[in-house]
Image (spheres, helix red, strand yellow):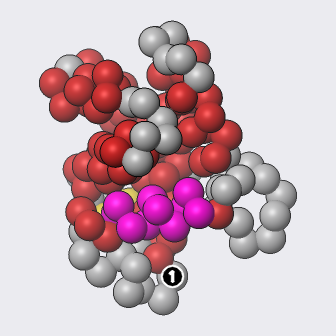
Amino acid sequence: MTKITTRKGYLASYYFLDWIYLSVKKNDGNIAQLLGDMNPFFPWKDAMSADPGTWFEWLDCADSVTPGVKANAAPENFQIHPDAAYETLKTFLMLYDDRDLYHTKWLIKALKKDPAMREKWNEFLSKQIAD
């Protein structure tokens, strides 16, 4: 599969989590809060998310999966493998769950064990690749 940018991986994750929030309905507001922080559609100049710290934490997670992301002059354009983007999503969710900010253990478990989740993720990723 074609490599993607960290930004496209982030956007695929945002849309995937939005689908989880709207379709799976197994959240207690944690996914909604995370989506609010991740929201990439705020009109702030050069902002990647409503909470800029969320974008930088995404990059930290991406760098832990694919070393070199943060060292790049334009980390949003760093090319990563789609599998690395999926692993970054899991790492990102674990980071927030470990910090006791967003309780997403149920989702992390599903991402690790449920092939249907990976298939759905791939749909959102394919849309980002096509854009």
Q: Is residue 96 above or below residue 66?
A: above
Image location of residue 14, percent across then percent down: 53, 41
Residue at 54% over, 28% down:
30
In the figure, is residue 19 to the left or right of 52?
Answer: left
Would residue 76 be seen by someone viewing this image from the given angle?
Answer: yes
The residue positioned farthest toward the front in the image shown: 100
The answer to if 58 sits in the magenta stretch is yes
Q: Is residue 24 above or below residue 77?
A: above
Q: Which residues are magenta?
A: 53-62
In the figure, is residue 114 to the left or right of 79?
Answer: left
Disc 1 target residue: 74
The picture quadrant where one finds residue 98 is: top left
The answer to if 17 sits in the magenta stretch is no
The picture quadrant where one finds residue 118 is: top left
Q: Nearer the viewer, residue 55 or 116?
A: 55
Image location of residue 6, percent across then percent down: 43, 63
Q: Nearer the viewer, residue 2 or 62?
A: 62
Residue at 36% over, 50% down:
95
Residue type pointed to by label 1: Ala
Q: Secondary structure at mark 1?
A: loop
Image location of residue 61, percent across then percent down: 35, 61
Q: Could you classify mark 1 by the number of other residues whose Cα lies within 10 Å: few (under 14), some (14-19), or many (20 or more)?
A: few
Main SS of the magenta segment?
helix
